[in-house]
Amino acid sequence: MSDDPAYFLVPASSGLCIQLKNGTIYTAEPNGSAEQKWFIEKGNEGQIAFRNGRDGQYLRGVGGGKGARIVTGQKQFWSLETSNTPNAFWIKCVDFPNAYLCNSYGKWSINNLIYMWAHEVTPLDADDAVVRIRLWYLGGAQKFEARLRSKQAWIFRAKELAEKEEQLRQKSKSADKQDSQGVDKQEPDEKQKKLEDRENRLAEKELQLQEREARLKDKEESLRSQAVSEASIPNGDLGPAIRANRVQSTRKELEAASVGRRSAPLKLRTSQRNAIEKGELRPITMPSNFVHLPRLRAG
């Protein structure tokens, strides 16, 4: 009996299936559960019974009037009547003269009540929806389960891919953050290095300036010492010492100073000395901006 094919009873007006719920039959989203499966047992003259996969009870109408409840219980037979809708059937309870399985108001929502209703003759131009509320499809549960497994596998695969994409996105985000931190860390390092290089260059320039100042100071001291060594005779009758420029020799400078004048030709010096010794001339000095020039006057 477990090898018998199972079916879904699908209202043509909604595309859902019916299932046993709290002892009553309602519409539901197909999921392949046992309470949604119905096994067909054949009777006489093409009659069939629908056995529920959950409790093993049979689909059963409690009455033949409009709105009579559908439950599960003892075996009850039904007949399938063809319709103008391809592959859709009227499902009539054989225990009553005019009682058909009906989807209440033809609603598409789940948990919609299934009950009995009469098969009313409708004109050809009647709304198809009015007709379809009492039309049913018998869908193979095996095919549905195969499609369901395929769909579930696809959903699982899609979910798996979405998770992998999220992981890759997080890794990429983490890598970007690390790169950003590395760049942020690298920039201060580069700035610090540039600052240190600049400080080193400034220190080198400062050292060069100090060395240059030392050389200039040494040169200045050397020039000052040289100037002192070249200074004129100290204070005496001839007044303050003067700086001699380009004198021929120290001896000549001292000789010129002894007579109160600069070096003169030998003949002139001899005649002047003789005049001084005779008392005819005496030496005098007069200050000048350049040198002290001796002048002679008659005694």
Image (cartoon, rainbow, N blue to C red):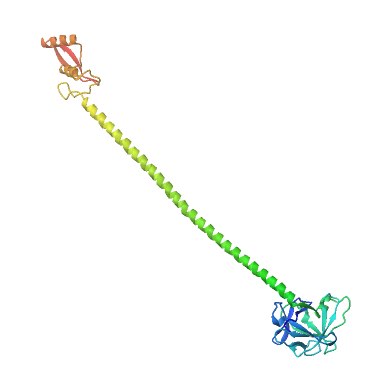
Q: Residue at x 65, y 67 (%)?
A: 157
| Residue 173 visible here | yes
Relative to 225, 125 lies left or right: right
| Residue 69 visible here | no
Spot occupied by residue 16 in the image (x, y as percentages of width and height) = 74, 77
Relative to 50, 174 lies left or right: left
Q: Residue at x 28, y 31 (%)?
A: 219
Front in this rendered view, residue 21 or 81:
81
State which quarter of the image contains the N terminus.
bottom right
Rendered view: 158 above or below 42: above
Spot occupied by residue 53 in the image (x, y as percentages of width and height) = 71, 83
Q: Residue at x 34, y 38 (%)?
A: 209
Rendered view: 208 above or below 4: above
Q: For the view shown, which residue lies furthest in the right direction?
A: 124
Front in this rendered view, residue 20 or 2:
2
Q: For the view shown, which residue lies furthest in the left direction?
A: 278
Quadrant assignment, res 118: bottom right
State which quarter of the image contains the C terminus.
top left
Q: Residue at x 42, y 50 (%)?
A: 192
Spot occupied by residue 80 in the image (x, y as percentages of width and height) = 83, 82
How many numbered tags mark residues here?
A: 0
Rendered view: 289 above or below 175: above
Relative to 215, 274 lies left or right: left
Spot occupied by residue 133 in the image (x, y as percentages of width and height) = 80, 79
Quadrant assignment, res 234: top left
Relative to 276, 2 lies left or right: right
